[in-house]
Image: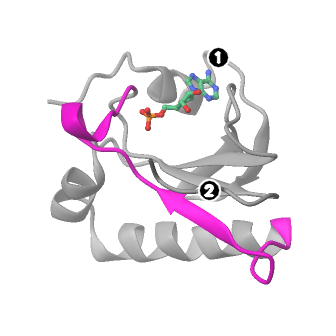
Amino acid sequence: MYDENNIFAKILRKEIPCDKVYEDEFSLFFKDINPQAKIHILGIPKFPCTSFSDFLKNADNESISFFFKSVQIVINQLNIEESGYRLITNSGEDGGQEVPHFHIHILAGEKIGALR
Ligand code: AMP
């Protein structure tokens, strides 16, 4: 069940601000408030979905395709394709997800290190 009051839903409704880096019809990308790397961007689809699986199951193909292409647009905008980056999506309790609106973390700008 999607929680309309989660913090990213509020950002999408512009009820709270974000440090935006890219926006289009399907997606919004902004800086993480508590960055874990020199570059730490969050990308969210505008479609209300709790997780990666929920997004893939319930959004239409156009929204899914445009969202993932927008991740690449942001990678190009940040000029990190050559130096490298890590994409992460946390899902559910075991995945350590805090905000229940599907999001992708883009980490870059330095060596990110081992996962654990
Ligand atoms: P996750 O654990 O994958 O759900 O990640 C949630 C992320 O959202 C964390 O990295 C937080 O630092 C980040 N975050 C929480 N609130 C905000 C906010 N208002 N603006 C930007 N990032 C946020």
Residue 74's x, y, as percent?
72, 66
Whether residue 81 is situated above or below residue 8 in the rendered picture: below
Label 1 lies in ligand 1 vicinity (Cβ under 8 Å): yes
Helix, strand or loop at label 1? It is loop
Horizontally, residue 115 falls left or right of residue 69, namely left
Confirm whether the magenta stretch covers residue 36.
Answer: no
Q: Which residues are magenta?
A: 78-98
Question: What residue appears at the point 55 percent right and 77 percent down from the top-left corner?
Answer: 69
Q: Which mark is residue 55?
A: none
Whether residue 49 is situated above or below residue 64 in the rendered picture: above
Q: Which mark is residue 16?
A: 1
Confirm whether the magenta stretch covers residue 96.
Answer: yes
Question: What residue appears at the point 78 percent right and 34 percent down from the top-left corner?
Answer: 19
Residue 48's x, y, as percent?
33, 41
Real-space CA distance between mark 2 and mark 1, rounded to the nearest whole angstrom: 32 Å
Horizontally, residue 113 falls left or right of residue 62, namely right
The amino acid marked with disc number 1 is Ile
- Would residue 26 be visible to someone looking at this image? no
Residue 107's x, y, as percent?
66, 54
Image quadrant for the N terminus? top left
Mark in front: 2 vs 1? 2
Q: To which residue does mark 2 refer?
A: 113
The amino acid marked with disc number 2 is Gly
Q: How is the image coloured?
A: one colour
Residue 96's x, y, as percent?
33, 33
